[in-house]
Amino acid sequence: MVEQVFSLMGWITVFAVISGGVIFGIARFVESDSTAYDMEFLWEHRYTLEELELEEPSR
């Protein structure tokens, strides 16, 4: 019984790590892609990032 509990906790931990990594990756992609999209399609490059008070994403 104790082994089953530890096994379940291990699987939950693995699932949480994988889910967290996927969510982090998607959030990072959306954050970096959103600024480029906004500059090109919404603002048509009329303003610089400094004028909009945005910082360039550091990679």
Image (cartoon, rainbow, N blue to C red):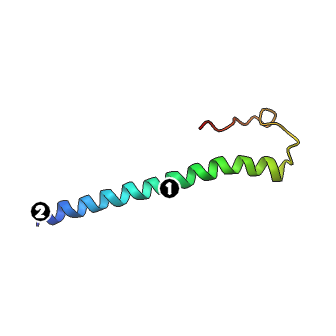
Sequence-first disc among 1 and 2: 2
Q: Position of residue 45 (x, y in %)?
A: 85, 44
Q: Nearer the viewer, mark 1 or mark 2?
A: 1
Q: Tell whether 32 sits left or right of 20.
A: right
Pick the quarter of the image with the C terminus. Answer: top right
Q: Secondary structure at mark 2?
A: helix
**What residue sits right under mark 2 in the picture?**
2
Question: Quadrant location of residue 55?
Answer: top right
- Total marks shown come to 2
**What residue sits right under mark 1 in the picture?**
23
Q: Position of residue 31 (x, y in %)?
A: 63, 48
Q: Position of residue 58 (x, y in %)?
A: 61, 36
Q: Residue at x 18, y 63 (%)?
A: 5
Question: Quadrant location of residue 53?
Answer: top right
Q: Secondary structure at mark 1?
A: helix
Relative vertical location of residue 2 with respect to residue 28 in this rendering, above or below: below
Labelled pair 1, 2 in contact (Cβ < 8 Å): no
